[in-house]
Amino acid sequence: MGASSLHQRFKATTAMSPLQFQKQLRLQEARLMLMDGLEAASASHRVGYGSPSQFSREYRRLFGARAVLFLSSVAFMGGTVAFASAASAPMLIWGRALQGIGEGIVVACCYALIPELFPRRLVPQIFAIESVVRVLAAFGGPLVAGAIAEAASWRAAVLVNIPASVAFVILVPFCVPAGRAAAKATLTGMPIPQLGLIVLGIFLLSAGGVAGHRLLSVLIMGGAGLVLGLAVLVDSRSAARVFPTNAFRLSDPMGAGLLLVLLLSMTEAPASVYAAFMGQKLWSLNAVEAGTLSATIAISWSLTALAVAHAPRFTASTYVWPAPLILATGLAGNVVALGFASLPAGIVGQTLIGASFGLSWARLCERVMDAAPVAERDFAASALPTVLSAGLAIGAAFFGALAGWSNLKADDSATSRLGTRQGSRTSSPATCSSGFTTSRTVRAATWTCAISAMSTAGNSTS
């Protein structure tokens, strides 16, 4: 039998050429190795790939990302239904946790797909578009949810996520290339110990703020730091990892970049998480107005990111170095807003905080991806939103604990005095201090994180 006849009969039997069949056999064998906990670089070498990046592209092309996006969307919708129908606090927490799992997988998968679907020169523009999507969600979400909550109930506002998720599922086949084989969702190993330690550490941070005794509170929060450090240590020695190799190491540009993302998001957390509370308690804003104040960060982030995307392509340090300083200035604006009940100062502070991320985020993400080993480039890309979300959660728990520790509170009588003024939303420092007590501890901790971020910026861009 001639070579051409063999080729034709082989393709008629297998629906692929001998070369395609050989490639699929290699990738199937590599998949089994990955399921056994082998590193991706080692698996690609063992099955005959000389380039780990080529192996990564062909592996994802064969097995596809659609199934992952579909399943995680279903998980998010299930969490949304549980959250909206919750009749108890544990049910509400489980619903939110399921939402977080689904959303986290979707975001991480989308970040990993960016370098595959788009050429490198377009990556900054893609991140700018991502920022526009962020502002539409952050600005439109509170407005729509606030309006629905006022007109109906908060449960109805939560259920708005269902049609949005359905639209996402419908769009996935049009945006994500299909694999050439039937994709089945498989787990190469879940990093359960690390995730459990991270959750425990965040819980301990929150618990430290409500401990009755000051010494006990310090011990609990110190233990939380040790638990979070242990999570990173366990992850570095595990086959199924949450973070790439050398994550958070200052000596490695990729590790320093991830550490900078963690510190920046931790420092932003008080302004991002508590802005709506501050607006309602300090200036008696309604739900829609408070949501708009909270969304100011996202609006500023997006507008700045769009400007950076069309700016001259300077070095990464040009965009990353100033970001912590701008963030610290924004935090100072929030301190003024808190201490003097100044709504304009709060808006300026939120705007500067968002601008610090808009200026640095695209270049910082690009730098982390470029500095990562070729075999872990996709891993590093998917770790970026994970670290960002973890930083927000850790920062919210940490600064919330410090706020509770130092009696940062708003009493209703003072709030009503501030909110009954129709002509102005400002008050004197004396009046404000009786209703909203600022904490030197919270301010000092926030500025410490900002200063640490400045020192880390140099390592991440070196």
Image: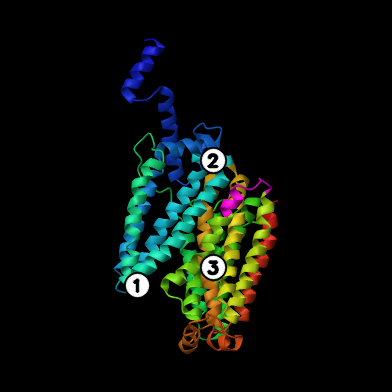
Residue reaching furthest to the front = 423
Gap between marks 1 and 3 measured at Cα: 26 Å
Span of residues in magenta = 305-315
Q: Nearer the viewer, residue 174 or 179?
A: 174
* Dot 2 alpha-carbon crowd within 10 angstroms: few under 14, some 14 to 19, many 20 or more: many
The residue depicted at 43 percent of the width and 37 percent of the height is 61
Image depth: mark 1 or mark 2 in front: 1
Q: Which residue is mark 3?
A: 269
The percent position of residue 178, horizontal first and vertical second, equals: 38, 38
Amino acid type shown at disc 2 = Ala
The residue depicted at 50 percent of the width and 85 percent of the height is 418
Q: Is residue 333 left or right of residue 183?
A: right
Which numbered dot is residue 150? 1
Name the image quarter holding residue 343.
Answer: bottom right
* Dot 3 alpha-carbon crowd within 10 angstroms: few under 14, some 14 to 19, many 20 or more: many
- Earlier sequence position, callout 2 versus callout 3: 2
Q: Is residue 12 left or right of residue 435?
A: left
Q: Is residue 306 magenta?
A: yes
In the rendered view, tell whether residue 129 sits above or below residue 16.
Answer: below
Q: Is residue 210 left or right of residue 167?
A: right
Q: Which residue is mark 2?
A: 41
Gap between marks 1 and 2 measured at Cα: 54 Å
* Residue 153 visible, this angle: no
The percent position of residue 351, horizontal first and vertical second, equals: 58, 65
Look at the numbered disc 3 and give the secondary structure of its residue.
helix
